[in-house]
Image: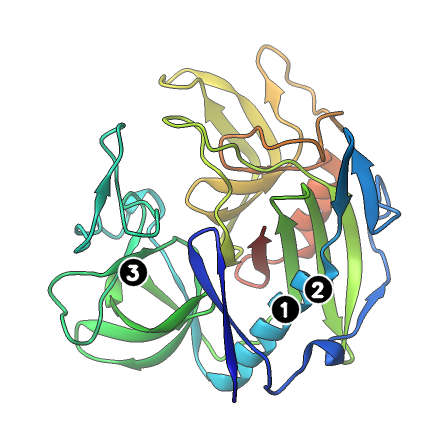
Amino acid sequence: MKMMNILIAGVLLVVFSHSLYADDSIIIKQDLLYDKYTLEKDTYVYNKTTRVIQWDVIKKCLRRIDNFEHQFMVNGILQNYKNKNGHAPLVKNFKKTKWNRYTDSLGVKQNQGIPLYDETDLNEPVLYARDGSYIAIVSDTLDFYKVAIACIKGEWYVPRKYVYDLGPVRFNKVIVIDRTNQNIVTLEHVNNEWLVRSKNPATTGLEKPPFKSATPVGIFVLQNKLLKMIYLEDGSNEVAGYAPYANRISDGAYIHGVPVNLPHTEMIEYSSTLGTTPRSHMCVRNATSHAKFIYDWAPKYGALVCVIE
């Protein structure tokens, strides 16, 4: 089996050039369940820039998921939202930002991160994985799980407290978010075909510390849902507004509808900024009715989210 490694935004994504499923065996057909604000063309123009729906990259993600789920029997999630499972220790080759925050050598933050250990040294981690990362459980010991991560090469040891065991599972619903082209596609696996359920403009997170971060790249399990996600003023405990129909991906990144800033309280259906440029704190903004579609269609722990470039 021949492997090809693709480095995407600091994450080593492993795809297979000869494997159980070739790219041309991934069949994608359109069968929309949500048909508002649909991107009618695969290539379109925004502000003199050509945008595309990257079907080739989407196929690679779907193929990676198929391969991963055929290779491993037991799957799970890495979790450390708000460091609830413990602050990760510093990695061997850490970096310190001017905001006094620590990252690993690939730029993944210590805050809300999950420590990844090599089998040769279980005392000091090598890298951090992101909260919500989709994994397979290879084996376990008293203190550690040995895991494979869907979007990172190799196998790693992770303290048990960071691992949520899903058991044997196959994911038939996948949400693909494109940071470069600012669009979102939902797909459902039915009778050996991937059916496109929606394809819409979206807006992702802007990397502008200390308060804003880019939406993280990777393959994640949809972890939680909130009818209204309350958000605060930057650097304050003051409530600034809410985002409707929020679906959590990783850390504080949610797929949600158009934000509503106080003193307004009524939901807003659409924003002209959707599909333009990154602008949120980390989240993925959608038309509110599309966020509701995802909220209703994609179950907690029952859908994957692939964030691509």
| Numbered disc 3: secondary structure | helix
Please give the label number shown on residue 56. Answer: 2
Amino acid under disc 1: Lys
Nearest to the eye among marks 3 and 2: give it: 2
Q: Tags 1 and 2 in contact by the CB under 8 Å rule?
A: yes
* Residue hosting label 1: 60
Quarter-of-image position of residue 29 = bottom right
Residue 160 relative to residue 35: left or right: left
The residue where tag 3 is placed is: 162
Which of discs 1 and 3 lies nearer the camera? The answer is 1
**Label 2: which secondary element:** helix
Instruction: Say left or right for 122 vs 204.
Output: left
CA–CA distance in space, label 3 to label 2 = 33 Å
Q: Which mark is first along the chain, 3 or 1?
A: 1
Point out which mark residue 3 bears.
Answer: none
Q: Tell me where residue 204 sits by quadrant.
A: top right
User: Where's residue 214, x and y in %?
Assistant: 49, 38
Residue 121 position, x and y percent, is: 13, 70
Q: Residue furthest left?
A: 123
28 up-or-down from 263: above or below: below
Q: Answer few, some or many: residues within 10 Å of disc 1's Cα (few below 14, many 20 plus, some between 14 and 19).
A: some
At x 88%, y 47%, the residue is: 40
Looking at the image, is 247 positioned above or below residue 22? above
Residue at the spot x=67%, y=41% of the render? 182
